[in-house]
């Protein structure tokens, strides 16, 4: 049992970080009592759980959390006015059956357990749902079913679509984060194996088979967005209860909260950027007070003003994630997401050197017409994920990487990572620019490989020349199409958040011939301060993703290529004014490595052009 306890604590520490803040000093912790419960699902599977309350288990509003991480893995504790029911998902913890990656059978369990919970003596018939990561995902997945007695939910850091938001973003296999989740769940199941064998041998076989099947299916057998994945994403809402979607802007599953809010906002839902897997700013409470107030209002009818607050509340970075965690951040409220009045500025990729990046092709981001057209090539070598893979970096950072990156800041900066790729940078801004919203990178790209992972990183370049990554866009070249009716299109007719069509691969897309790709960049919320620059790097995929066949990628920029970054600029900012050159231009120092890298870049460009001429 001690081994199980240690594994459980380790898994929760890594995969469900950071847990919510402790009870404030000076507040007495009420005595809590717990009772093990068991529910038999309609197919005969036994679902285990634990109900906890203060003093005694009398009838109270009850918050329910469905977790695959076993007993003791709850991630939110409300005050003494509530009971809490932690349900161990089938095939995990003490529950029998086969784990199905939070699929249809687990979703049916959600509805059946809620019906049971509603009728228990410790429930007053008013249920709320809470979820963090996997326990939020299963709620989103289950909302197409009638969820009895549920009046509200707080969902933090959960995917809206498991394929698109976490495991295969842009059609690129995000193998390591997915494997970490399944290994964490599987390690607990393995540790509980002896107990299972002694009490329920058949359940042990089901659990092992379910874990193996889940890993194979999620990791290898379903590279396209097929029925398997469609059943593990949001499929509609028949309930209508309001949701508080909570997350952090750098979270490994950040896209989910934004999409969840947009789908459910007509229910009276809110979006709160307070933190998640990515940590939360010093001096803040990780959204604890807001979630408590949300439950108080919706489950106890407390008139506390929580629903009168602006429905969208953003905690924005001010240059990078590390400074944000240290307490340097901005707050912004809005009536909707994207923020009303947002303009998407079209920054063209320009071959004219910016003189600020030591990369194979140091180009410019130009708000007006580009000065120079060219075809620029790079080899998409696997990149160090601590810089190029912003969401996964945040997950690892909250789990301990921050201690290392704070000692060695270059670890999470784009300097060496961007070296073999293509960089495009604006001039230094002469005034602050507030950027928040989804973004898009349009690239005219060809490749010598059968398919390649297009990987782009947007950074805030500080005055000392260091580039601090803010968000990432990923797209497998075999998925060139978008679903226009599900894409976000601004008033100018620009597709500013492309909804990629990952249902079928297009063989030969981009192979030796330019293809215009629309790459979805995950939402950004950052202030680019005066003196800073905006940069986009096109590089090789993170080493934490499945590699593609090696080749040379070529990007057409300038002229009529159509390669551009669509950046969301909040209405209080004027990017055109911020990019107006000052009367005396600041000196530009070309990095020492630039001549060498430009030479290599030029040679790669020649190779790319020759290969194109061969077809």
Image: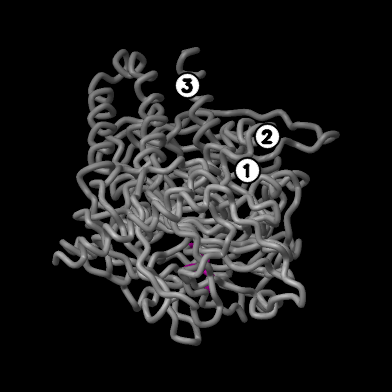
In the image: residue 363, left or right of residue 272: left
**Placement of 31 over or under 115, stated as above or below:** above
Q: Are marks 1 and 2 in contact (CB under 8 Å)?
A: no
- Tell me the residue at 45%/59% (across/down): 361
Of marks 1 and 2, which one's residue comes earlier in the chain? 2
In-front residue for pair 219/445 = 445
Dominant SS in magenta: helix
- Of the numbered discs 2 and 3, the one sitting upstream in the chain is 3
Residue that carries the numbered disc 3 in the rendered image: 7
- Spatial CA distance of label 3 from label 1 is 22 Å
> Helix, strand, or loop for circle 2?
strand
The residue under the point 64% across, 53% down is 465
Using the rendered view, name the quadrant where residue 436 is placed: bottom right
**Residue beneath label 1, please?**
279
The reply to whether residue 500 is in sight is yes
Which picture quadrant has residue 48?
A: top left
Q: Are marks 3 and 1 in contact (CB under 8 Å)?
A: no
CA gap between label 1 and label 2 equals 29 Å
- Mark 2 surroundings within 10 Å by alpha-carbon count, few (fewer than 14), some (14 through 19), many (20 or more): some
Disc 3, SS: helix
Residue placed at 60% from the left, 51% from the top? Answer: 468
The residue positioned 27% from the left and 23% from the top of the image is 204
Above or below: residue 483 compared with residue 600: below
Q: Is residue 142 visible?
A: no
Give the CA separation, mark 2 to mark 3: 27 Å
Mark nearer the N terminus (3 vs 1): 3
- Residue 95 position, x and y percent, is 36, 31
Number of labelled discs? 3
Residue 35 lies left or right of residue 235; in this view the side is right
Residue at the limit of the structure toward the bottom, as seen here? 492
The region drawn magenta spans 260-266
């Amino acid at each position: 049992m001690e081994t199980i306890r240690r594994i459980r604590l380790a898994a929760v520490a890594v995969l469900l970080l950071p847990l919510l803040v402790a009870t404030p000093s000076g507040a007495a912790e009420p005595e809590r009592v717990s009772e093990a419960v068991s529910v038999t699902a309609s197919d005969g599977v036994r679902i285990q759980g634990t109900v906890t309350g203060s003093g005694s288990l009398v009838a109270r509003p009850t918050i329910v959390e469905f977790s695959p991480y076993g007993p003791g893995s709850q991630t939110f504790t409300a005050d003494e006015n509530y009971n809490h029911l932690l349900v161990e998902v089938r095939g995990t913890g003490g529950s029998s059956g086969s784990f199905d990656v939070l699929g249809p059978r687990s979703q049916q369990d959600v509805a059946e357990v809620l019906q049971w919970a509603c009728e228990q003596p410790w429930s007053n018939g008013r249920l709320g749902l809470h979820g963090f990561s996997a326990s939020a995902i299963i709620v989103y997945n289950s909302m197409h079913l009638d969820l009895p007695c549920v009046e509200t939910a707080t969902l933090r850091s959960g995917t809206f679509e498991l394929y698109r938001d976490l495991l295969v973003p842009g059609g690129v296999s995000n193998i390591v984060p997915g494997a970490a989740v399944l290994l964490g769940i599987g390690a607990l199941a393995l540790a509980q194996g002896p107990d299972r064998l002694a009490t329920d041998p058949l359940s042990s076989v089901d659990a092992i088979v379910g874990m193996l099947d889940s890993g194979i299916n999620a990791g290898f057998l379903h590279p396209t967005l097929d029925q398997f994945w469609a059943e593990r994403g949001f499929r509609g809402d028949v309930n209508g209860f309001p949701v508080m979607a909570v997350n952090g802007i750098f979270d490994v599953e950040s896209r989910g909260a934004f999409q969840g809010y947009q789908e459910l906002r007509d229910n009276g839902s809110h979006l709160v950027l307070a933190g998640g897997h990515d940590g939360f700013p010093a001096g803040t409470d990780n959204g604890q007070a807001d979630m408590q107030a949300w439950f108080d209002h919706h489950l106890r009818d407390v008139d506390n003003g929580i629903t009168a607050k602006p429905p969208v509340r953003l905690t924005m970075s001010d240059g990078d994630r590390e400074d944000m965690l240290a307490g340097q951040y901005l707050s912004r409220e809005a009536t909707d997401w994207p923020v009303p009045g947002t303009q998407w500025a079209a920054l063209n990729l320009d071959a004219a050197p910016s003189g600020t990046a030591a990369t194979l092709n140091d180009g410019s981001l130009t708000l007006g017409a580009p000065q120079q057209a060219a075809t620029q090539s790079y080899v998409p070598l696997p990149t160090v994920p601590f810089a190029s893979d912003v969401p996964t970096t945040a997950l690892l950072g909250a789990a301990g990487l921050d201690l290392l990156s704070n000692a060695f800041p270059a670890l999470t900066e784009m300097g060496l990572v961007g070296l073999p790729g293509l960089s495009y940078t604006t001039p230094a801004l002469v005034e602050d620019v507030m950027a928040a919203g989804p973004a898009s990178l349009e690239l005219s790209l060809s490749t010598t490989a059968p398919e390649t992972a297009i990987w782009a990183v947007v950074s805030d370049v500080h005055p000392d020349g260091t580039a601090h990554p803010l968000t990432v866009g990923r797209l497998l070249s075999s998925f060139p199409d978008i679903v226009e009716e599900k894409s976000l299109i601004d008033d100018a007719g620009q597709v500013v958040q492309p909804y990629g069509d990952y249902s079928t691969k297009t063989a030969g897309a981009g192979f030796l011939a330019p293809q215009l790709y629309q790459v979805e960049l995950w939402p950004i919320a950052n202030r680019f301060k005066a003196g800073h620059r905006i940069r986009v790097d096109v590089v090789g995929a993170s080493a934490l993703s499945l590699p593609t066949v090696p080749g040379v990628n070529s990007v057409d920029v300038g002229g009529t290529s159509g390669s551009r970054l669509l950046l969301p600029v909040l209405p209080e900012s004027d990017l055109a004014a911020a990019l107006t050159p000052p009367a005396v231009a600041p000196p530009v120092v070309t990095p020492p490595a630039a001549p060498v890298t430009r030479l290599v870049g030029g040679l790669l460009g020649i190779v790319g052009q020759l290969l194109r001429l061969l077809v």
